[in-house]
Amino acid sequence: MTRQASVVVYAVGDTGATGEFLGAATLIEPEFALADPPLNRTLADNPQAVRVGIFAAAGDIAEVIDVARVRVLPDAPDVVLLQLAVVSAAPAVGVPVELHADPTGVELFPQPTRAEIIAAVRRVLAAAPPPPSPDLTPHVADDPIRWLLHLFGND
C-alpha cells in the first residue's frame, strides 16, 4: 500500500477562503480521502468545513478540491472519510479488503461485511506516516497550497 499522492487538509473560513493547515489524509478512492491521525480525531470531535490539496508528482497532478462532507462512522470514530466534491485524478491507494470465495458457490465473491471494511480502512490508517512535530509549522517547501501565495509574497 504505497502512497503515490500527497493529500493535505486545510480549514475553510466563513468567507470560503482557505484557512489554516490542519493535517494530512490518504486518498483511498478517487471520491474519498481518509483523515490521517491525529486529524481524524480532531474532525470526529469537531467537524468543520475543509478543503484538500492533492499532489501526485508521477502524473503531474495538483488539485485543490472542496470536501463535500466529513463523514464519521459512529461505531468507529477513528474512521473519518472526507467525501470530495469532485473526483480526484490522482492515484488512490484503495481499501485492502480481502475477498473470500463463497464456499457454497452461490456468489463468486460475496460482499465484505461492515466489520471487514472497517478493519481494512484501519489498516490504511495504521500505514499513515507519523504527523509532523507540533513544534514545526508548515513551510512553503512542504505546504503545497501556500506555494502560490509565496509567489505574491504572502509567506
Image: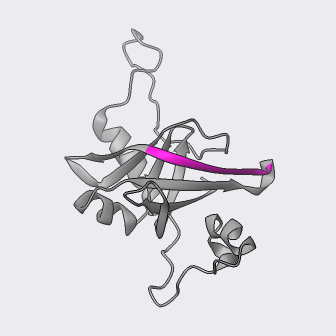
Q: Is any part of residue 5 visible from this angle? A: no
| Magenta stretch contains residue 63 | yes
Residue depicted at 37% across the width and 57% down the height:
14
Q: Quadrant of the C terminus?
A: bottom right
Residue depicted at 46% across the width and 20% down the height:
109
In the picture, residue 15 is in which quadrant?
bottom left
Residue depicted at 59% across the width and 56% down the height:
53
Bounds of the magenta segment: 60-67
Color scheme of the displayed model: one colour
x, y (%) of residue 40? 35, 61
x, y (%) of residue 41? 30, 64
Choose between 74 and 14: the one closer to the eye. 14
Above or below: residue 79 compared with residue 30: below
In the picture, residue 30 is in which quadrant?
top right
Residue that lies at the very extreme toward the bottom in this rendered image: 135
Q: Is any part of residue 77 visible from this angle? A: yes
Residue that lies at the very extreme toward the top in this rendered image: 106
x, y (%) of residue 81? 39, 47
135 vs 57, left or right, is left
Q: Most prominent secondary structure in the magenta stretch?
A: strand
125 vs 47, left or right, is right
Q: How many marks overall?
A: 0
Choose between 24 and 99: the one closer to the eye. 24
In the picture, residue 7 is in which quadrant?
bottom right
114 vs 93, left or right, is left
Above or below: residue 81 compared with residue 57: above
Residue depicted at 39% across the width and 24% down the height:
111
Above or below: residue 135 compared with residue 4: below
| Magenta stretch contains residue 150 | no
